[in-house]
Amino acid sequence: MDAHPVALWRYQIIAPLLSVHGPRGALARLIRQLAAQTHEHPLRGPLLIHPRTLEEWLSRYRHEGLDGLAPVPRKDLGQSRRIDPALASRIEELAAGHPLLDGPGLLAELRALNPPLLPSLSTLYRFLRARGLDHRAAPPRADHRAFEFELPGDCWQGDVMFGPTIAQPDGSRRKTYLIAILDDASRLICHAQFYFEQHLTSLKDCLKQALLKRGLPRRFYFDNGRIFRSRALLCLAARLGLQLIHTRPYKPQGRAKLERWFGVVRSAFLARLDPKALSDLGYLNRLLFAWIEGQYHVSPHRSLDGQAPLDRWMLACEALRPLPRDLDLDQLFLEQARRLVGKDGTLSLKGRRFEAGPFFIGQKIDLRFDPFDLRRIWRLDAAGALHEIFPVDLAGNCRIQRAPAALPLPKAPPPPLTALDQLLTQVESQQPQPPAQETKP
């Protein structure tokens, strides 16, 4: 156990006295010399020490060692001289029964009792500290424990951070959002990118890039935000065979690693940018990629015992799961929509028109598309197969010969209608027949 700092300070002062050998009175002379000097106390500043105090310290050290130089606690420690037992009991009752009552409020209640001696506010606070009542209104401490998954790919954490604003051609500035995916075991950034929208579409694009670069994880650990609680993300995790975990509400401590990385982004990346000069989202993302790969991934990390995130990732890369060969990520991450085909055989999607063909005029068809690449989309048929659809080429349609309208096929003669004839026969059969007339000879 570490020695008390005051005991060590006292030992440094009396240390010269331990080796005094000489004629009678040499020890007394040295004590008077030390008493005439100023000594820097570790807590109280410069002090002059009385010769009798030095003699007492020397005697205590010779009999008890270093422990004898430690300060002796007061016998009345924790007891106030201005608060008698009856008043102390009343203070404890008030403080424990009303945890939201502050010091001035407690004094006001005590003043109403008209005690013979009312303590000061500082005395009251010292009394509460000694009795452990100074933090009575604090919420109970939750059991937050640091954790770390064993292998890279065991768990990926994801979250969103507000990014810088980007200048627009009209002079306005548009907000950006940084979506990042971090590997828990290695602190490696699987993918991070700035987007203009904090939407599910942006998250799916970020996840797609992370899967293409870093393989298939075993768990996703996300916030309780709307985009992380979406049914589409749950379906995606189910198709990939991943466990989707969400932080408990109002418990952000579980994502401390990613929150810490966001702090590094603010201090080590965003602080080095000129916000007024940012006018291109693509350029901002290229700078972020260069900083992550060229600085963050190769720099020693304190939480990894000085290892770089990329080195930790590479040391355990045999535990990573590659993407299945038969898995088509492009189709897995496609958005879906339903559109009505107009009279000209086209449909509208994301402000662009696509050629569906005259066969689907007036029908609603199911579409699959990549919102970041609208050079083509796909039509989903009843069998689940995808058929490519391309944007409308107005100039090309001018040169394409229209197919003649299909002539209606000749129809067979319709079957005769017999219901009324049958009804007539039935009704007439139920009518009474008139009597037959006799003929005269």
Image (cartoon, rainbow, N blue to C red):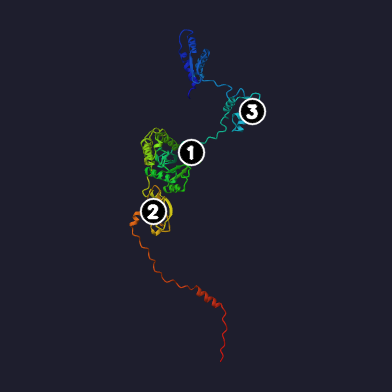
Question: Marks 3 and 1, how far apart in space?
Answer: 42 Å
Question: Crowdedness of circle 2 by 10 Å Cα count: few (<14), some, many (20+)?
Answer: many
Question: Marks 1 and 2, how far apart in space?
Answer: 45 Å
| Relative to 76, 9 lies left or right | left
Question: Where residue 3 appears, x then y in whole percent?
Answer: 48, 22
Which amino acid, mark 2? Phe
Which amino acid, mark 1? Pro
Question: Where residue 217 appears, x then y in whole percent?
Answer: 41, 43
Question: Where residue 220 appears, x then y in whole percent?
Answer: 44, 43
Which is in the foreground here, disc 2 or disc 3? 2
| Relative to 416, 298 lies left or right | left
Q: Quadrant of residue 300?
A: top left
Q: Which mark is residue 252?
A: 1
Residue nearer the viewer, 122 or 35:
122
At x 63% / y 29%, what residue is drawn? 108
Pointers 1 and 2 in contact (CB under 8 A)? no
Residue carrying label 2: 354
At x 48% / y 37%, what residue is drawn? 253
Give SS at disc 1.
helix
Q: Quadrant of residue 434?
A: bottom right
Residue carrying label 3: 110
Q: Earlier in the sequence, mark 1 or mark 2?
A: 1
Question: Crowdedness of circle 1 by 10 Å Cα count: few (<14), some, many (20+)?
Answer: few
At x 48% / y 15%, what residue is drawn? 38
Which is in the foreground here, disc 1 or disc 2? 2
Residue lying furthest top: 23
Residue lying furthest bottom: 441
Q: Is residue 75 above or below residue 266?
A: above
Residue nearer the viewer, 8 or 267:
267
Which amino acid, mark 3? Leu
Q: Is residue 70 above or below residue 438?
A: above
Residue 245 seen: yes
